[in-house]
Structure formats: C-alpha cells, structure tokens
Amino acid sequence: MATPTSSEKLSTETSSNGDTTCSVLTTAQLVELDAAVCEALEKRDNSGLNLIGFGEISVALGVPKHAPVVVCKPSPPVTRAQFEDFKTLIADYSVALEQLGAVAVETEVLAVDRDEHVIAYQVQPLLDAETLGERVLGAAEPDREHPFLVKLAEIVARTNNRVSVDAQVTNWSWDGETATMLDLGTPMMWDESGAPVLDTSPHFAALPAPVRGFARKDILELMNRWKQPRAVAADVVANLIRVELEAWVEPTLAVFNDVLAPNEPLNVEEARASLARDVKSFPRLKKMQQVERFWAETVRRRRYDFFVQPSKLD
C-alpha cells in the first residue's frame, strides 16, 4: 500500500452538503478532481487525468495526478437518496465479503454535487502494483498450489445466490497472506426474491432510452450466472486467457476442480464459452454508449457524463 507523505496527508474537511472527506483527500481536491473529470468528458480527452485503470463500465483515477496516493472511482450521476443507498450498500458488501473469506479494500464513498445530480466517488488507497493479482501470477511459475489461487478457490466455493464476487484475478490484490477485493462498485448481492440489491438504473442511463430495457435484461442474465460458484470459476479462467496468462489455466482448473466440481470437472471449453458471451455483450454495450453520447452532445447539447473507454474484449 502506498503511504502518503506528511505533506500529502491532509486534514479532514466537511463540505457544504455535509459529507466528510478522508484524511488523504480534502473536499477541495475532490471538487477539483470532478471539475477535471467534467472537462475530460466534454473534450473527450483524458490527458488532464491520471487514468490508472479501467474496466468495461468504470475508470480508476490516481489522485493527486502526478503523485497519486489514492484511487478514485466515479459512479454515474445519481440522486442524493440513491447516493446514500449506494454508500450503505458498499459498506454492507464489505461485510458480506468477509463471510466469503475475502477482505474488501478500504473504501470511502464521497459525494460531489454536479449540476442537479450527485456523483459518488469511491476513494481507495493506491496499492503496490506488484500485489495485483495478474502481476502476482505473472511473476511466478504456474503452480496449482500457489496460495493466491488456493485462497481464491476457497472464496469462490462460498459464493451463493445472495452474495458473490467478480473473482477475475485482475480484481484482486495478494500480499502473500490476504486476498483483497478491489472492485466494489457493482456489489454482487441479491435479495430474497433473487433481484440485485444494487440499483442499476443509473448505469443504464448511459444507453439510448429505446434499448435500456433489452440491455438491462442482458446484463441481469450475466450477473445471475455469478450466483453459481462453477460459473464464477469459469469466469476466472476466462479472464486468465484474456490477460495472456494461459500458462495458469490448467493449474487454476485443477485447484478449482478440487473444491468445486470433483465429479464433473470444469474444463477450458466452458471457460472459453464464458469469454465468448462477454465478447458478444460488452463491445455491443460500448457501441450503444457511443450512440447515446452522439445524441447527448449533438442533439441535446449537453455533456455525456460517462466515460467510453475501448472495450478490453474487442
């Protein structure tokens, strides 16, 4: 974990809307960051930001830009009530992850007023890059007994139809003893009826209104597969293929089959099918985002408040 210097460690402040910032990020810094985000969105130019990572639906920004000590992940525009619900859900998910044997990265959810909406920023410590899951495996010889893989398999085996994880190795940090979950922005939790606890409507505002219902159906189907440990394991293996860690596929299949499917082993074809589903779904969502961005900017003459990064699955 990166440790801030005394000059970077700033005192806690309280904003005009009542939100208190963490000790390494002042209200002024957060407001300045959001202004830079707005400028980047308006100009379609991320050069004013330190974009240290992005997924299919999110970005991670290093703050301060030139010597980051925290990672800030902006969420879609929401109402104040939706922000409070999201903040509570992140806390609940962190507790739920402990029941699976995982540790959630320390996360503070802060709010910035933007126009008539609120933007939620997940603020997390900047971890040592060498502890990231793909770096850990990339630096080691493939081994089914690697402690990170063993721990990940134990966590996946405990997932169920109420709480799960996106267990791709790119979403984890491993310090030799602890598996820390980094991706908390889309909590994998479901209520008694089987519906996601997360309010997904702010995310679908990124898409053209006529297709939101169809897209939501597709995404909910994708999310529902994570209720089954076997499907989560298949996704882990698919991610290894995607990030060019194919040497780890067979050891990973072996350790997952030990705890998940000794009588009906998971195989690489099942993992490739999982990858194929994502290759079909996520790039299509990116194209729909581009359509909505064009409509927002050229017809409605307003800023499109979502990043459209290249899909990692193209």
Image (cartoon, rainbow, N blue to C red):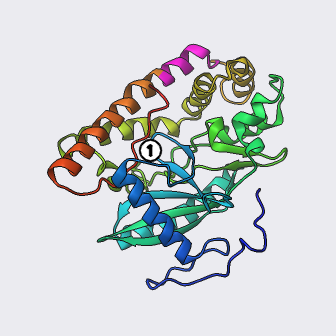
> Which secondary structure class fits the magenta region best?
helix
Is residue 214 located in the magenta-colored stretch of the structure?
Answer: no
Residue 257 visible at all: yes
Q: Is residue 188 visible?
A: no
Q: Nearer the viewer, residue 139 or 164?
A: 139
Farthest residue to the top: give it. Answer: 269
Which quarter of the rendered picture does the N terminus lie within? bottom right
The residue depicted at 66 percent of the width and 24 percent of the height is: 261
Q: Tell me which residue sits at (71%, 50%) in the image.
A: 180
The residue at 67%/49% (across/down) is: 100
User: 13 left or right of 153?
Assistant: left
**In x, y percent, where is residue 36?**
46, 61
Other-residue count near label 1 (Cα within 10 Å), few / some / many at <14 / 14–19 / ≥20: some
SS type, badge 1: loop
On the image, numbered disc 1 is attached to which residue? 57
| Closer to the camera in the image, 228 or 104 | 104
Expressed as whole percent of the image width and height from the top left, the position of residue 138 reads: 75, 29
Of the pair 74 and 133, the residue shown nearer to us: 74
Task: Give the residue furthest to the left.
Answer: 299
- Image quadrant of residue 166? top right
- In the depicted view, which residue is nearer to us: 244 or 85? 244
The quadrant of the picture occupied by the C terminus is top left
Q: Position of residue 226 (x, y in %)?
A: 51, 38
Image location of residue 287, percent across then percent down: 31, 33
**Location of residue 39 by image quarter:** bottom left
Q: How many marks?
A: 1
**What residue span does the magenta drawing correspond to?**
265-275
Question: Please, what is the three-letter code of the amino acid marked with disc 1?
Answer: Ile
Classify residue 84 by image quadrant: bottom left
